[in-house]
Image (cartoon, rainbow, N blue to C red):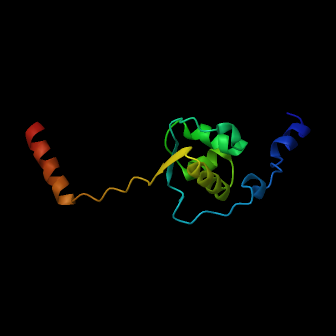
Amino acid sequence: MTDHDRQEAETPDLVRSYVITKGRALPQEGRFSLVTLVTAAPDQGQQVARLSPEERGLLEICSAGYLSVAELAGHTRLPLGVVRILLVSLKEGGHVITRPPVRRAEAADRELIEEVLSGLRAKFG
């Protein structure tokens, strides 16, 4: 690898965030949290050609299944705020489906688990 190749690889993209988001503001805090799950909506004849390259990229990544907003930002290497703004646009256009993250399971009763374990040991040795 030459010095020129190394410099080229380290050069950041020169497209500013406000150009990608078309000047739109961040959505409300609760609308797209880091752990909101996003997937592509079933194709209903929506006009994907009118989407920006970044929106098409997000839609392509989302087509594999549910991913969190944070994962989408990591895959696209776009700032989190930009991804959230683009997702609002895709959601309004009917291109993506969102769902809240799976809630954390409540802790099981330790005594109950020990009783089950003791019963299994007594039955199966």
Residue drawn at the location 69% of the way across and 37% of the way down: 49
Q: Is residue 93 left or right of residue 11?
A: left
State how many labels appear. Answer: 0
Q: Quadrant of residue 48?
A: top right
Residue drawn at the location 72% of the way across and 55% of the way down: 21
In this view, the residue in front, 76 or 111, is 76
In this view, the residue in front, 10 or 95, is 95
In this view, the residue in front, 65 or 118, is 65
Judged from this view, the residue extending furthest toward the bottom is: 29
Residue drawn at the location 70% of the way across and 41% of the way down: 50
Q: Is residue 49 left or right of residue 3?
A: left
Name the spot of residue 51 as percent of width and height, x first. Answer: 68, 43
Name the spot of residue 120 as percent of width and height, x first. Answer: 13, 43
Q: Is residue 57 left or right of residue 120?
A: right
Vertical placement of 100 versus 50: above or below?
Answer: below
Image quarter in which the N terminus is found = top right
Name the spot of residue 68 as percent of width and height, x first. Answer: 52, 50
Image quarter in which the C terminus is found = top left
